[in-house]
Image: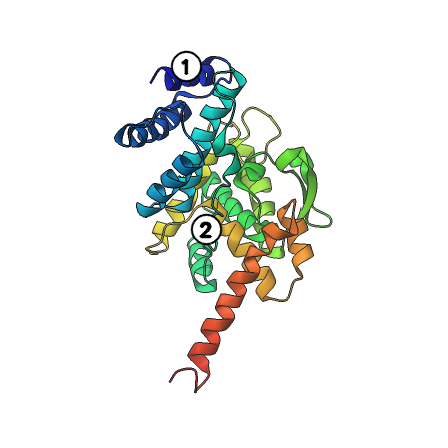
Amino acid sequence: MKYINNYLEYLRVVRKYSDKTILSYYDDLVEYQEFLQNNFINILDIDDKVVKDYLKYLYSRNITKTSISRKLSSIRGLYNYLTNEDIITNNYFSKISNPKREKHLPKFLKNEEIDKILSVCENNTPLEERDTLVLELLYATGLRVSELVNIKISDINKSDKSIKVLGKGSKERIVLYNNHTKVALDKYLSDGYHSLNKKNNGYLILNNRGDKISDRYIRDIINKYVKKAGLDIKISPHTLRHTFATDMLEEGSDLMTVKELLGHESLNTTSIYTHITNEQIRKTYNNAHPRAKK
């Protein structure tokens, strides 16, 4: 355990890793150490065969590819450290690639579900006006929640219904909103915003103290209206982003336009939504075509 402990101390002091991350490394490396001990192998005396045997062991446990990748990364990091410290001369784990990650299709809402959520929004109080705007904006623009909470009044161009947002990597882009969102925005800015704007900090979406709203609070707002709509589903702000992208493509938008609106770096990231629409096409075909039902 001496080498593992030294490596974990290096991660804590030099690399400034969090306690949670170091604990994850610890669990992975202790498990690996136990595998070696059960096979009477010294942690410094491994070779290609040991690496292959450990891989077989991991796959035999039927754990996810994500977990396997994490464990391999932990071990690879340990041996990189030992190599840099001149304790060993060869990192056999550096030759091993992580398994390809499993692709999970993003969860999105059906049209009737999003309609139910938006239909239970009311505008009787400043907070209700704000909540309505939050839901309308997330669905109309496909914004990340971090982008939503950082919108400032000065970012909004009401004349062409657009908003300037600062996305990942501090990259600016323009998103568009529709007439439903315009109604919610105008109502909020003319009424509820003035009640909440106690600090004049320039942010659009405020809490009841006048501060910029938190990511977590946005999640609470969504959960509140999902429950109010009587839906037995679990969603997050990102679900509305997925729903925006899926609906855009299903209604005929091209992939490049959706990529730009979402602020994706790569078209490959956006292309996952084509898998969703293909799945919907397949389901519709199987349910509708007489011979597909048999």
Q: Horizontally, is 271 left or right of 279 in the view? A: right
Q: Mark 1: which amino acid?
A: Asn
- 48 is higher (above) or lower (below) than 258: above
User: Where is mark 1, residue-wise?
Assistant: 6
- 105 is higher (above) or lower (below) than 54: below
- Foreground mark, 2 or 1, reads 1
Q: Position of residue 69 (x, y in %)?
A: 44, 39
Q: Position of residue 260 (x, y in %)?
A: 68, 50
Query: Contact (CB < 8 A) between labels 2 and 1?
Result: no
Query: In the image as oriented, which residue stretches furthest toward the bottom?
Result: 290
Q: Quadrant of the C terminus?
A: bottom left
Q: Dot 1 lies on which element?
A: helix
Which of the 4 quarters of the picture holds residue 230?
Answer: bottom left
Q: Dot 2 lies on which element?
A: loop
Q: Residues within 10 Å of mark 2 (few under 14, many from 20)?
A: few
Mark 1 or mark 2, which is nearer the start of the sequence? Answer: 1
Q: Residue at x 60, y 60 (%)?
A: 248
Q: Residue at x 52, y 22 (%)?
A: 89
Q: Horizontally, is 9 left or right of 200 in the view? A: left
- 217 is higher (above) or lower (below) than 272: above
Q: Position of residue 47 (x, y in %)?
A: 43, 32
Which of the 4 quarters of the picture holds residue 18?
Answer: top left
Q: Mark 2: which amino acid?
A: Glu
Q: Is residue 149 visible?
A: yes
Q: Residue at x 35, y 56 (%)?
A: 231
Q: Residue at x 56, y 24 (%)?
A: 199
Labelled disc at residue 102 = 2
Q: Is residue 152 visible?
A: no
Q: Nearer the viewer, residue 61 or 222?
A: 61
Query: In the image as oriented, which residue stretches furthest toward the left?
Result: 38
Q: CA distance from mark 2 to mark 1?
A: 33 Å
